[in-house]
Image: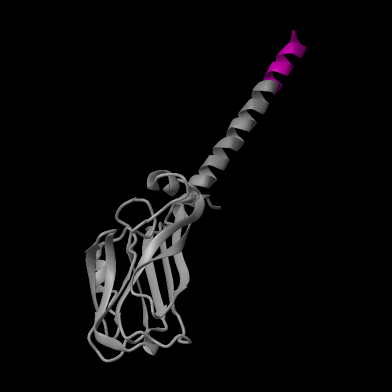
Amino acid sequence: MGKDRRKTGKTILNLLIAVGFLAVVVFLLFLAAGSVETTMPNNSYAIKITGLSDLVVNGTATVMVPVPAISEEMLTGRHQAFGWQTAVRETPYGRMLAFTTTGSYAPDISVSSGEFEKREEPRLLVPVLATPDMNIEEFSRLPGGTYTSVVFLDGFVPPSEDAAPVRFTLEYRGGGGMKHLVKEDTWTATVDTTVPGAASGFVPVPAEYQVVAGGIRF
């Protein structure tokens, strides 16, 4: 009988130790979470277009690029490039960010800005002309892939055949906020391609989409 009591007492003691250890671990996790600064998710869009300065403007020149899921105020109010007027325009493919100039030459464009995220939407640069064998919603749930977007050029004097192409380097980055120990997913959509300087009108371009998974960070 005494031996059984000692075994029972030892079992209860081990159980209490295990519960106490678990309570300490939980307490430390909450303590660590409370000491970690909360970071708001962010939307940023960087636009760089080079090769424009080699072209001659023929009256009014317009360059348009796709837009991410961010506010129009950020696109038009903060993406002001030297020598260009900026506006969001409706096109046959959807909204695009337009840069327009009436100067005799077109300076290269390099602008970037960001805002705290206000919503969750598919993080693609749009318009989307085509996705690989699925609709946009299905594609946006993938961890990454390549799809087709579009840029626009118009109003330039046709350059010589050996003229340098126009390079579009676009990068959208969204999400990535941190709340306590939990980091949110980060979405990126990029375009890095060249278009002949003699191109005019809408030009389909490849775009890359990638999701970097979040999770618990210690």
Q: Which residues are magenta?
A: 1-10
Q: Residue at x 25, y 79 (%)?
A: 100
- View extreme (right): residue: 3
Is residue 58 found left or right of 210 in the rendered image? left
> Residue 169 at x, y = what percent?
44, 73
Residue 131: in magenta span: no
**Above or below, 181 relative to 153:** above
**Above or below, 79 relative to 130:** below
**Nearer the observer, 80 or 94:** 94
> Residue 111 at x, y = what percent?
35, 77
Q: Residue at x 36, y 68 (%)?
A: 151
Is residue 20 found left or right of 182 in the rendered image? right
Q: Is residue 37 visible?
A: no
> Residue 36 at x, y = what percent?
46, 56
**Nearer the observer, 52 or 139:** 52
Quadrant of residue 22 in the image? top right
- View extreme (bottom): residue: 104
> Residue 43 at x, y = what percent?
36, 62
**Above or below, 139 relative to 128:** above
Quarter holding the N terminus is top right
- View extreme (top): residue: 1
Q: Please identify the dominant SS of the magenta region.
A: helix
Is residue 80 found left or right of 50 in the rendered image? left
Q: Residue at x 27, y 72 (%)?
A: 98
